[in-house]
Image: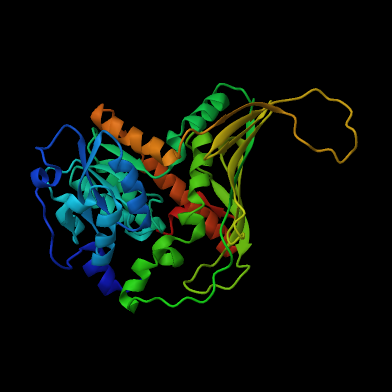
């Protein structure tokens, strides 16, 4: 775990330095309008990326940003549109205490999601929390308990963008209306990354490193299966009818030495067993020299669906016919295909703010928690080199 003194006193409580406050009237030149006012907790890479998309939504208005590190705040104020006029905080509790703040984006290190989510629920905010729901079982359970306490009229989203993509929604419709028949197998491929990492020396003091470089450490990120592969596993659970697996087996390890941090795997092959005889496979590899294969497949008795962040495909049976030779394995079964019109994070951001404005409450805490726990189940199966059950996994936290 990261240095407990730093984590508690600075990252969680945010008791660091001064607060820069600019009144909303001054910042935006007018009195508060009907748009949803939102703030960002965590202005690193993902916070700045999603936050920028949020500022471009006509239903949203950025009024506050927060980060424990002053340099991150300053960078965000230059990068995120409108952030230079937003109130800036080093203490997330002060941001959540602003009465004119309707919603919050939580984009902090994974292990802090439960703490920050719980506080946002208590403050009565609409919440868009980045995935996953936590780095360990105890943290995920904490977040799910907080989700159960949220006001029923709140909109609570997590960064599982596939659920809001028109192409994924169309593929799900094809599945649920029986276009591929009875589904018994699902696969998720999460293959991407550059060349293997070399030695790395952080320029920051030791007490900051596991916050600044949280993605390289198991305790702060959960490792690649939880922090990265959870996207595909959330999709498998979703297409399984929002059910989670009951057990898992898997293998994996390190192909290359870790230059910094303590990842235990950079590739994994995990088999998940769902109720009703349905299986889900995760095939994942990092450090692939730029090669990318990120998609899902759903195999039914009458067809196959393939989904990705940029398209969906429907394949169906084709007439049997002699092939020119036994090695001609080209696929001719494509029935229909549709490509995504835009980056699917925009689809989720738009749905989030429209749901708030339209008073259409939603709460993803349960399904997002279960998808994160599915990833933890898979990691345990790989690490322990044996079958691990869902109930056994739950007992570890």
290 to 128, vertically: above or below: below
116 to 240, vertically: above or below: below
Could you tell me if residue 69 is visible in this image? no
Q: Is residue 174 left or right of residue 85?
A: right
Q: Is residue 344 left or right of residue 188?
A: left
40 to 349, vertically: above or below: below
Image coords of residue 258 (percent x, y): 54, 72
Could you tell me if residue 63 is visible in this image? yes
What colour scheme has been applied to the protein in the rendered image? rainbow
Residue located 35% across and 47% down the image: 50
Q: Is residue 104 left or right of residue 236?
A: left
Residue 13 appears in which quarter of the rendering? Answer: bottom left
Image coords of residue 8 (percent x, y): 25, 67
Q: Is residue 99 left or right of residue 280?
A: left
Name the foreground residue: 166 vs 85.
85
Image coords of residue 378 (percent x, y): 54, 54
Name the foreground residue: 395 vs 324.
324
Residue located 17% across and 50% down the image: 85
Residue located 27% across and 56% down the image: 78
Name the foreground residue: 175 vs 67.
67
> Looking at the image, how many numbered discs can be counted on the residues?
0
The C terminus is located in which quarter?
A: bottom left
Residue located 44% across and 39% down the image: 344
Image coords of residue 366 (percent x, y): 37, 42
The N terminus is located in which quarter?
A: bottom left
Residue 253 appears in which quarter of the rendering? Answer: bottom right
């Amino acid at each position: 775990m990261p240095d407990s003194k730093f984590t508690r006193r600075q990252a969680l409580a945010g008791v660091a330095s001064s607060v820069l406050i600019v009144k909303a009237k001054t910042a935006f030149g007018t009195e508060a309008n009907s748009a949803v006012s939102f703030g960002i907790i965590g202005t690193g890479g993902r916070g700045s990326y999603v936050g920028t998309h949020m500022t471009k939504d006509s239903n949203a208005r950025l009024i506050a940003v927060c980060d424990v590190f002053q340099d991150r705040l300053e960078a965000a104020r230059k990068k995120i549109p409108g952030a230079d006029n937003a109130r800036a905080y080093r203490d997330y509790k002060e941001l959540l205490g602003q009465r004119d703040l309707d919603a919050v984006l939580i984009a902090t290190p994974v292990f802090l999601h439960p703490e920050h989510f719980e506080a946002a629920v208590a403050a009565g905010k609409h919440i868009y929390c980045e995935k996953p729901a936590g780095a360990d079982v105890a943290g995920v359970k904490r977040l799910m308990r907080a989700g159960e306490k949220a006001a029923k009229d709140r909109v609570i989203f997590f960064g599982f963008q596939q659920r809001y993509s028109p192409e994924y929604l169309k593929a799900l419709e094809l599945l649920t209306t029986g276009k591929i028949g009875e589904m018994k197998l699902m696969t998720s491929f999460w293959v991407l990354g550059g060349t293997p990492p070399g030695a790395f020396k952080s320029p920051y003091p030791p007490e900051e490193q596991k916050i600044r470089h949280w993605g390289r450490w198991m305790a702060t990120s959960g490792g690649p299966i939880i922090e990265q592969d959870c996207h595909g596993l959330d999709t498998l659970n979703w297409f399984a009818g929002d059910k989670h697996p009951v057990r898992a087996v898997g293998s994996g390890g390190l192909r290359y030495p870790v230059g910094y941090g303590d990842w235990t795997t950079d590739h994994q092959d995990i088999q998940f067993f769902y109720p009703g005889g349905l299986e889900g496979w995760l095939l994942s590899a990092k450090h692939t020299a730029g090669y990318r294969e990120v998609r899902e497949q759903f195999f039914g008795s009458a067809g196959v669906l393939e989904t990705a962040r940029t398209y969906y495909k429907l394949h169906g049976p084709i007439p049997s016919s002699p092939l020119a030779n036994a090695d001609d394995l080209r696929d001719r079964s494509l029935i229909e295909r549709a490509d995504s019109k835009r980056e699917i994070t925009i689809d989720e951001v738009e749905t989030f703010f429209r749901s708030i404005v339209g008073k259409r409450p939603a709460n993803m805490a349960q399904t997002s928690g279960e998808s994160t726990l599915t990833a933890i189940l898979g990691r345990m199966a790989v690490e322990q080199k044996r079958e691990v059950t869902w109930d056994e996994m739950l007992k570890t936290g």
